[in-house]
Each structure stands twice: as C-alpha cells, then as structure tokens.
Amino acid sequence: MAVRMCPAFGRSVFIPATTMRWPIRNCNFLVQNCVLDPNNSRKLVLEVKEKLAKDYHSLPQGKNGRDDEDMIYWFLKDRKFSVEDATAKLAKAIKWRRGFGVSKLSEESVKNIAETGKAFVHEFLDVNGRPVLIVVASKHFPAVHDPVENEKLCVFLIEKALSKLPDGKEEMLAIVDLRGFGTENADLNFITFMFDVLYSYYPKRLGDVLFVEAPFIFEPIWLLAKPLLKSYASLVKFCSVEDVRKEYFTEATIPANFRS
C-alpha cells in the first residue's frame, strides 16, 4: 500500500501496491479503486457537516439528518468525495425524507396496500448476504391502487430492507416476479418514481435486479422503461425461477413463491 496525491482532491489517497505500476492519469480511477486516508475522509465528513449546518440549518438533525456522519460519508462516496456535490445531494435527500414523511412510515401505515401481496421484504438474506426485496408484478394494478399508497409502500420496504443489512454489506437484491404479468400491471410512472428514489435518496444501495420469467408481452414495456432507469438498467438480469433458486438462495432460504 502506498500513498499518492490526487490532484483533483488535493489530498492523499491510499493506492494498492499492485496498481502502482500504472500511471495515475485521472481521479475517477482513484475514487473507484482506492480508499481515502481515514484522516482525510473524516475531515471531508466534518466539512459537509459544517456546510450543512451553515447553509441548511433548518434541516433536522439526528439519524438521517444533517449531522448523521454515517449518512454524510455514504453520500460523499456516492459523489466521489466532492464536498459540494455531496452537500447538495444530501440536503435534497434530507428535505425529501422530511416532506415524504419517511420517519412516519410503519407496518400499520402501509398495511392495506401491503396486504395485496404486491411487494415484501423476504425473511432471509440471499447467498451474498443481501436483504431481498420481492415485487410480484401480477398483483400491481395502477388503475385500482392508490399511487400515493404504492409510493409509501415502496419507500417503507426499501427502508425495511436496508435495516436488515449485515455489517459490511451495502446493497440489497431486488427480485421482480413477472409470471402472470399483463398490460394491466404496467406502470411506467411508478417505475420512474422507484428508480428516481433509489438514485437520489438511496444511492448505491441497489445491487442486482432480477426480472424473473419475463413474458413476451413485457418486452415493449421494457423498451419503454429501460431509458428511464438510466444507469440502473445495467443492474437488470433476466432469469428463470430455477436461476433464482440455484444462484441466489440455499434450499432453506428460497422464497416461498419460488419453491417447486
């Protein structure tokens, strides 16, 4: 392990010895492959914290607030350790959480829409130690269900899944069961909402997205939806029920709706 100066950051970063033979030409490489000196990362967290206190003093404090150092560090990582960018994105996220009422969401508040069975957090982790959010597309009816309630359930389940993250894990797995999917289940507005929320307010928290047993009728929906997902589209994997069983779970942890 060696220490080199990153011109864009103006501070030292740790660089694995195996990469030292390559010339350092840009800081995107450094951000993606190296770890900031702990002292410098701590300094950046405090800079964001102070900037939020100064420029956004009306924002709430505490967990998921402007002085939550874990949250600040996560947004710094997402914004490649740019204090300005992290501050702006985090301030937006905190404002959204307050306006949306994230802290007020509970099992009881989403009970009615959750009872449709359209989405839930699996009781077990996958083989990679990730919490699992399962969506049953055939139970989603945008013409019938209240879109506001759908959004509340979505955010509640994201929060619930992330609360199950084991130490050292950062991402969750999303599984979209497309068996029985029909045009009446298509909902581009909700898809846009969900991925906007993940990008803006829960960055880098979504790992693989499994589209299971996609029927032919889903193809035109996917062609419309794919551009809306932007970079998240690259996380999507089309697979079979058998793939889900064998590659992501053990016999004891397979979700009930994917059992034989």
Image (spheres, rainbow, N blue to C red):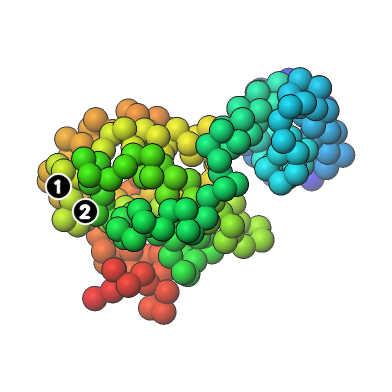
Horizontally, is 188 left or right of 60 in the view?
left
Query: In the image, what residue type sits under mark 1?
Result: Gly
Quadrant of the rendering where the N terminus is positioned: top right
Looking at this rendering, what residue extends furthest in the bottom direction? Answer: 252
Of residues 192 and 152, the one nearer the viewer is 152
CA neighbours of label 2 inside 10 A, class few (<14), some (14 to 19), many (20+):
some
Q: Position of residue 220 (x, y in %)?
A: 17, 35
Query: Can you tell which quarter of the image residue 29 is in?
Result: top right
Give the residue at mark 1: 182
Q: Position of residue 69 (x, y in %)?
A: 77, 42
CA neighbours of label 1 inside 10 A, class few (<14), some (14 to 19), many (20+):
some
Query: In the image, what residue type sits under mark 2?
Result: Ser
Of residues 137 and 116, the one nearer the viewer is 116
Query: Can you tell which quarter of the image residue 92 is in?
Result: top right
Cβ–Cβ below 8 Å for labels 2 and 1? Answer: yes
Horizontally, is 186 left or right of 134 in the view?
left
Q: How many labels does the image show?
A: 2
Q: Can residue 247 be seen in this view?
A: yes
Element marked by disc 1: loop
Q: In this view, does 207 lie above or below 198?
A: below
Query: What residue is at 48 percent from the left and 36 percent from the top?
Result: 197
Element marked by disc 2: helix
Q: Is residue 15 visible?
A: no
Quadrant of the rendering where the C terminus is positioned: bottom left
Tell which circle, 2 or 1, labels the residue nearer the N-terminal end. 2
Q: Position of residue 259 (x, y in %)?
A: 28, 74
Give the residue at mark 2: 138
Of residues 175 and 9, the one nearer the viewer is 175
